[in-house]
Image (cartoon, grey):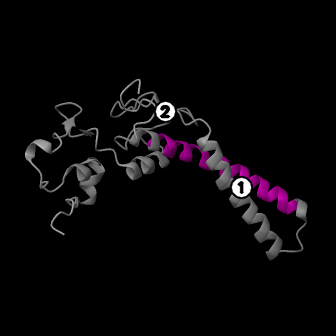
Amino acid sequence: MADAPPRKQEVDESAATFAPRAAELETTTPSGPPEASSPPPTTVSPGTSQVVDRPTDRNLAVAMGRGLLGRCPNCGRGAMFRAYLSVNSRCPVCGEDLSGERADDAPAFLTLLVACLVGCAGVLLSDESSAQTSILAVALFWLVVTAVASLLVLPRIKGAVVGYQWALRMHGFGGARGR
């Protein structure tokens, strides 16, 4: 029990909105020597309070959540997409380089999985609930619902995949080049 890792301090909601990385950076003092602790965070410019992460500060859940919302995985405020599925090369707010993303087929596969699950479940439930409706009407209705669901889900899943890659430093997101 004495060797338990330090717990993060809680930060009120308004402070988390303006400095989302502050809660992750504020920890109790480690039990090890002071030389082993990570260096303090740096700011983007001297006049701002925005914090730039250090190599060990990338939280996977936070990055994927920000990606789901279509926001920059680093700051959470800048838009990740400049068009429907086109990722900005840099975050317009913090300047984080997002050009290293290589989402490829993962978002399409995951979207297909989600949309087909919704469509198939809908067809099965419609068949059970209203037997008088023609199969053509049910099929057309759920085909449209599946298409709309896939169009709505695809950019969110792509954002989550880009956030995942950013948090794990994959494909040029802050990792050493050439490894």
Residue 127 located within the stretch drawn in magenta: no
Pointer 1: what residue?
116
Residue 145 located within the stretch drawn in magenta: yes
Residue situated in front as seen by the camera: 164 or 150:
164
> Helix or strand or loop: what does disc 1 sit on?
helix
- Image height of 167 relative to 118, above or below: above
In the picture, measured across the screen, residue 161 lies left or right of residue 118, that is left
Q: Amino acid at mark 1?
A: Cys
What distance separates the C-alpha of mark 2 from that of mark 1? 26 Å
In the picture, measured across the screen, residue 38 lies left or right of residue 101, that is left
Quadrant the N terminus occupies: bottom left
In the picture, measured across the screen, residue 23 lies left or right of residue 152, that is left
The picture places residue 110, in percent across and down from the top left corner, at: 62, 49
Q: Which mark is residue 101?
A: 2
- Image height of 126 relative to 64, above or below: below
Q: Mark 2 or 1 closer to N-term?
A: 2
The picture places residue 131, in percent across and down from the top left corner, at: 87, 74
Magenta stretch bounds: 137-163
In the picture, measured across the screen, residue 91 lies left or right of residue 84, that is left
